[in-house]
Image: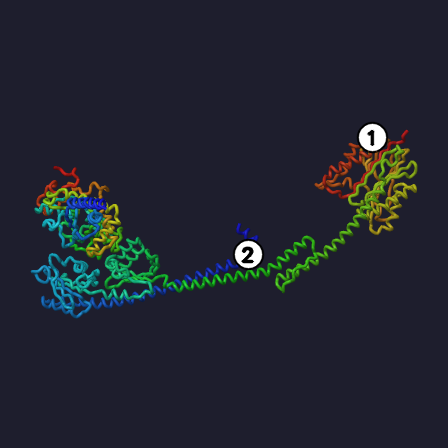
Amino acid sequence: MIKNIIRNRSVAFKLILFISGSTTIIFLLIFWVTYKFSRDMIEKNVEKNAQNLSNSTVNKIESVLCTVKKIPENMTYFLENTAFTKKETLNLIRMIVKNNKEIYGSTISFEPYAFDKNSLYFAPYCYKKDNKIEFSYLGSDSYRYFYLDWYQIPRELNCPQWSEPYIDVGGGNILMSTYSVPFYEEILGKRKLKGIVTVDISIEWLREIISSMKILNSGYTFLITKNGTMVTHPIKEFIMNETIFSIAEARKEQNLREIGRKMIKGESGFVPFKDVETGKQYRMYYTPIPSTGWSLAVLFPLDEFMADIFRLNYILALLGVVGLTLLIIGIVLISKSITKPLHAMAVATEAIGKGNLDIELPPAQLGDEVGKLTESFRYMKKSLKEYIQKLTETTAAKERIESDLRIASEIQASMLPRIFPPFPDRKEFDIFAVMEPAKEVGGDFYDFFFVDTNKFCFLIGDVSGKGVPAALFMAILKTLIKMEAQRGFSPAEVFSRINNSIVTENETSMFATLFCVLLDIETGEVEYSNAGHNPPFICTASNGVKYVDVPKGFVVGPMPGIKFENKKMILKSGDAFFLYTDGVTEAMNPEEQMFSEKRLKDTLDKLKEKKTEDIIHAIREDIKLFVKESIQSDDITMLALRFKGKAD
Amino acid sequence: MIKKFLISIIVVSIMFCKICVCAERVKKTSLLPLWEPQAQFAGYYVAYEKGIYKKYGLDVTIIKGGPDYPPDQWLEKGKVDFAIMWLSAGIQQRFSGVRILNVGQIIQRSALMLVAKKSSGIKSPKDIDGKKVSLWDGLLRLQPIAFFNKYGLKVKIIPQSYSVNLFLRGGVDVVSAMWYNEYHTILSSGINEDELVGFFFDKHELNFPEDGIYTLEKTFQKDPALSLSFVKASIEGWKYAFEHPDEALDIVLKYMRIAGIPANRVHQKWMLDRMKDIILTDNDYTGIGILKQSDYDRVASELKKNSLVKNIPNFEEFFVSHDKKYNKK
């Protein structure tokens, strides 16, 4: 369908379609590769950037956390190796709170009865309040510190722990986290938990570090705890109130939940992320803060860091469109310059086709293909004109010859006796003959004439070759035979004499077969001779149709001194001679079978009683029936004579 | 002019009379929920906000609740007319001599449950044997202990405070949780539901219905209609909350903000959805407020088994239904 539509379009259309089509494909391919390659490159850069930014931030945080961690860790060393008094313990924590500005409070909390056998709780707590250092004892029925996270988790896990951050309402609404380190004592060689040392630190500085991270213009960061709780986030309501999972649940973002799970497992990653609410696309890099197990996420807005690529793409697309337009204009111009002379040629060709060979061809373009085509066309036109002229002349000549031939044929026909009955007053015999030439003029002939009052001569002949030469040769033969016969020679003598007279001037080596009969119409005696002709048939009442017993004899014409023989026989009344040429027996049907002598003989058998004219017409019809639509290839000549004897 | 003046006098008088009648009918009363505002008490806040209490002729004051407001003591001292308490706490208080009545058993199915991570190898009760289990104190231990006894499990009990962090960090294998609260906190901390296995006590023939409405016997006797109206209005409040969850959540979140409590809508939505599950156990509203004697007997006998009560208070004296057909005279 499409193929057909294209096939019928102009060259310009096809050029535009295929060239601009393939150029567009190539352009798009380049465009896509460029886009993909540059996007990958930029994304890799962004990832590296995010990684560096996050790592440096994490390192900054870690360095602070590690310093803070050292303090309670060092304290446990003293607590495990020195037996402190109550006063010394209090001094120790007071010093720690006093000398470390990051530390807002500290406690050394002991296991039940571990410090004093008489007291369930012993947990002196030193904290800053209004720039003064305050003191209190933790532990009461309403504050059973053993069961609180800051104590219980490190106790059960036997390792230091950062607590989930909490907002210290009493201390000015600042975000705090408590680092708890368990310490032990040896009892009977067994390590047994003695208590937990904690320091409370503000993590406001951490919030500040993270909040101050600048991620392009609209990027942002957030920090989650091990539980996924938001510690920092540009949306204030999320902070300490939502976890990444509750946000995912509220927004129905399964992807965010999966990211959150990886984050709290301490994994790092660079993932695409789409904000469901704003529809904005980001690339998110997340990495853990090793000390606390919290996780930092940095979100790069796709539209911003891809802005350069988008601009590049815009320019590329613009260039592509402009280039393609120019290309199409170029193709249109070039194809017009090609098709315009072609179109003119097409018009000229049509005119030439209609026979106007004098039409002016368009001027030849320089040396290009169209110019060459025009030149060839001009040459063709010239040749065609000459050829047609020659053809006209030849045709005229041919027509002249054909007209001559037609006349010759008429002359030839008029040379043979064609009026039947030829001698209406002679009742002794009945004669009929036909000659149908294959071409305009034939080489067959027949003749009959009276030699004297009683002697009647009839003959048949076939000249080699056809056409005018054969006709002329035949005319000579016919004249010579009649001339010699009328001088009283027997048929054999006639043959020898004409042979000798022909041979001397026969340069074309033409020859003829002849059969000549001399009939005495009084007696019925016949004398006949044969010069290489088909033996005729004789139909008698007693014997039916038979071949005439012919004497030997060669054809007339090729060489001098040939001897011919005469034979004689007596005809009874009713006997008939039938003479014919090979055009009868060799008439071909489409199956290339010949009419044959046998068929001729059989046909004659059926016709022997008839009048000679009827016999010949019937045989002619039989031949026509036999050959069907085949073209006659040879002259067909037949002559029949029935002897009736004297009328009385 | 005079005509107009007279008409307005008549209109004003009619309105005044109406106000008088209303003022006469409105009864002042108060409610103390078991805890701070949250979806666990959505029905009461909704009944108040949507004027359902008012419709029943009640002017209710809902007290904020929280750790400083123990309902049993407030009720005993008569500081409040109605309080929300667990059935087990109610029975124990009645036994200890405080003449309180259960006038409406709201929660029908216990939400207390045990939760474990599948990764700790726990799939069925027997897998808990020998594991570390954190349990809340007091009456909240009743069901877990009965559960362990039922399956003959020996466990290491760790006292549990307010958070589930010890469980999240792997300090214990099994944690107590309220289905409508801590269970969702665990999910919101990044553990998927299919990574958890939960043991609901009602699935182990240990159903202890929880929140119910309690009042002093003398308060009830003074004005039985007040108590019954209060219960009916509260049930209607719950019905409204379940049928309009978004509106109910808005109301709950508003009260949480007023009380200065961090409000997380997803969490409250989960809580309201679970409240519907444990209140509408038969999926209809006819069962709300009814205390089944079988539930009462189960809880009471478990209390007695643990020597928390010496004898079981009479069910008929303990529970008064707002629906008259349940009250035997």
Q: Residue furthest front?
A: B1
Q: Residue furthest left?
A: A118
Residue at 19 percent of width and 55 percent of height: B259
Q: Residue furthest top?
A: A648
Q: Against A453, is B68 above or below?
A: below
Q: Chain of mark 2?
A: A
Badge 1 density bin: few <14, some 14–19, many ≥20, Cα 10 Å: few
* Residue nearest the observer in this picture, B24 or A391: B24
Give the labeled residue for mark 1. A541
Q: Position of residue A478 (x, y in %)?
A: 86, 44
Alpha carbon of mark 2 to alpha carbon of mark 1: how far? Answer: 91 Å
Residue at 23 percent of width and 55 percent of height: B263
* Residue nearest the observer in this picture, A206 or A70: A206
Q: Amino acid at mark 1?
A: Ala
Give the labeled residue for mark 2. A14
Q: Chain of mark 1?
A: A
Quadrant hosting residue A97 = bottom left
Quadrant hosting residue A33 = bottom left
The answer to whether residue A239 of the structure is visible from this angle is yes
Residue at 38 percent of width and 63 percent of height: A306
Q: Please, what secondary structure does the residue beneath circle 2 have? A: helix
Residue at 90 percent of width and 29 percent of height: A648
- Closer mark to the observer between disc 2 and disc 1: 2
* Residue nearest the observer in this picture, A435 or B290: B290
**Horizontal relation, residue A620 to residue A325: left or right:** right
Q: Please, what secondary structure does the residue beneath circle 1 have? A: loop
Q: Position of residue B205 (x, y in %)?
A: 18, 43
**Horizontal relation, residue B31 to residue A251: left or right:** left
Q: Amino acid at mark 2?
A: Lys
Quadrant hosting residue A442 = top right
